[in-house]
Image: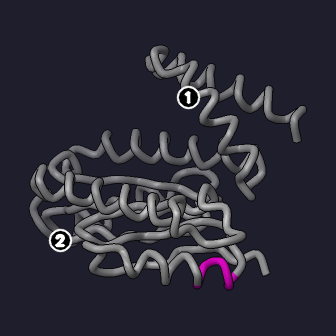
Amino acid sequence: MKSLLIPVTMLLLLNTLLSGCAALVIGGAAVTGAIIATDRRTPGAFVEDETIELKAKQAVSKDEPLASARIKIISYNGIVLIVGEAPTEQMRDQATRIVEGVDKVRTVHNEMRIAPPNSAAQRNNDSYITAKVKTSLFGKDSIEGIDATRVKVVTSNETVYLMGLLTRQEADAVTETVRRVKGVQRVVKLFEYNN
């Protein structure tokens, strides 16, 4: 595992440098290394997810009509979640088609709403909810025996989406904990189960 960590970290560093984010390299490498070390995905799958997100975002941004949509794309083990808002159903469907065309994408869950883009206040509230959810998974009330770094948390319009590679028991415990967080209106489980 350790022998793979260095080449993967170097690949991510190179990718970061080439994308113009050199200021984040040092801190990003440490965080990336820590995530890879505890993640149940293989280092290759971790890198593929980062690549999927990058390619999908680039492909969507090149589609002129989608420029008016607010789209967030998250990949975990080749399963892609799309959240945000699109003005029309056709634009929502177009986003799905584009992301499905990205190499290594296994499944797409398009949870975009047909609506104008959320206000900055709503997006800030969603970020606050995400922080509270992560705190509930890591903090003093954390779930015994569950490594919260294995849970990807995404909030859009007060709906919390949970992704990760967990056992069914872990997923149920995480979901119950998240449902109790103030401000969470709905929880959507997109877990893959390893038992």
Q: What is the residue that sits farthest to the front in this orientation?
A: 140
Position in image of residue 57 (x %, y %): 40, 44
Alpha carbon of mark 1 to alpha carbon of mark 2: how far? Answer: 34 Å
Instruction: Return the residue nearer the eye: 140 or 51.
Output: 140
120 w.r.t. 112: above or below = above
Instruction: Find numbered disc 2 in the image and state the secondary structure of the residue it sits on.
Output: strand
User: Can you identify the residue that label 2 sits on?
Assistant: 114
- Kindly tell me whether residue 29 is visible in this rendering: yes
Q: Which mark is residue 130?
A: none
Quadrant hosting residue 96: bottom left
Q: Give the label, 1 or 2, closer to the camera.
A: 1
Quadrant hosting residue 6: top right
Quadrant hosting residue 168: bottom right
Give, as a single range, the part of the protein colored magenta.
168-172
User: Can you identify the residue that label 1 sits on?
Assistant: 28
Q: Who's the residue at 54% across and 59% down the image? A: 138
Q: Who's the residue at 37% across and 70% down the image? A: 160
Asked if residue 49 lies left or right of residue 91, the reply is right
Position in image of residue 74 (x %, y %): 46, 55
190 w.r.t. 79: above or below = below
Label 1 vs 2, first from the N-terminus: 1
Q: Main secondary structure of the magenta part?
A: helix
**Tag 1: amino acid:** Gly
Structural crowding at the residue carrying mark 1, measured as other residues with C-alpha within 10 Å and reported as few (<14), some (14–19) or many (≥20): some
**Tag 2: amino acid:** Ile
54 w.r.t. 182: above or below = above
Q: Who's the residue at 69% across and 35% down the image? A: 33
